[in-house]
Amino acid sequence: MADAIVARALAKRYGRVDALHGLTLRVARGECLGFLGPNGAGKSTAVKMLLGIVRPTGGDGELLGRPLGDRRARRSVGYLPELFRYPGWQSAREVLALHARLMRLAGAPRAIDAVLDEVGLRERAGDRVETFSKGMQQRLGLAVALLGEPELVVLDEPTSALDPLGRSDVRALIERLRARGTTVFLNSHLLGEVERVCDRVCIVDRGRVIAQGTVDALTGEPRGVRVLLDDGWHDYDVANAEVPELVARLVQGGARIQAVEPRHTSLEERFLALVRPS
Ligand SMILES: Nc1ncnc2c1ncn2[C@@H]1O[C@H](COP(=O)(O)OP(=O)(O)OP(=O)(O)O)[C@@H](O)[C@H]1O
């Protein structure tokens, strides 16, 4: 089967602004890709080109095996835009019914119930959108994106309005999508979330890809250990093989060791090192 997303030197120029300089990217079916970058890096522009909403000024690509902009491929894609607004007077169920009609979705009532359950909005389905909190509106946006079990789901900041419980719900939701084989393209500034759910990440900055790879490859092998002593955590730069000697030495010296754990570079630390001007 063709890859879910292929981009070859995909570029967009708005007048003098190089919004995206040349994105080359492949996302396999069933993969969860984290697409990261600081504000203004070109992420939304890339998403809009992949979805055929914005026309590239350079390069090309495919979505689910079809050229970018192809309507048939778009039918199999669910999209949660970063900024969206549904009519306040409509109920959540009405918003979903409208989208189901636009999609000519067969078996709409059942599909609508399924996505309402998926995002935890079933009990509020009959309430008007204007009575929803920001987090509830974001859940509704997610429900719209999931309608009809799309093969590829593109989520632009899906958890920006959600509390920690809501974020954990969305993480679980993404895990369920992956278990079903759905491809997920996740655009987020919440690097901890990305680190937990994504297989691979692509980092863009000022219109260019500056790093791409698995989370492990980007954050690197664990380096050294952290040891919890009575007065708090201490870092030790030792190889794995030297850890037993380190612990023995500390104990002989009278230290009371409460915990020892590998020291990881977080995705956030790596991201900041990459995008911060040195
Ligand atoms: N329609 C447009 N016309 C002119 N310039 C644009 C347009 N859309 C985006 N840009 C510019 O392109 C660059 C990339 O913007 P984009 O919205 O893709 O960034 P982003 O990475 O999604 O940012 P954010 O994290 O803030 O959402 C910015 O310099 C922006 O000002």
Image (cartoon, rainbow, N blue to C red):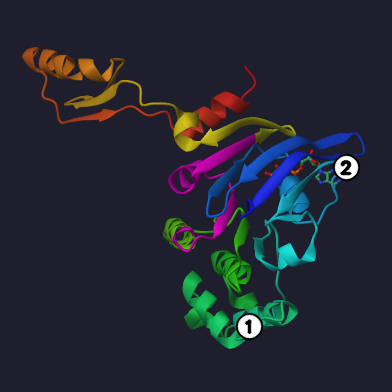
The answer to which image quadrant residue 231 occupies is: top left
Residue 18: % across, % down: 83, 34
Residue 260: % across, % down: 21, 28
- Secondary structure of the residue carrying tag 2 is loop
Residue 205: % across, % down: 68, 32
Per the model, the C-alpha gap separating discs 2 and 1 is 40 Å
Pointers 2 and 1 in contact (CB under 8 A)?
A: no
User: Of residues 89 and 147, which is closer to you in this image?
Assistant: 147
Residue 61: % across, % down: 76, 47
Magenta stretch contains residue 3 = no
The answer to which image quadrant residue 247 occupies is: top left
Mark 1, residues whose alpha carbon is within 10 Å: few (<14), some, or many (≥20)? many
Image mark count: 2
Give the residue pinned by disc 2.
57
Question: Which residue is at a point 88% across and 42% down the rendered structure image?
Answer: 57
Magenta stretch contains residue 189 = yes
Mark 2, residues whose alpha carbon is within 10 Å: few (<14), some, or many (≥20)? some
Give the residue pinned by disc 1.
91
Up/down of 225 relative to 61, above or below: above
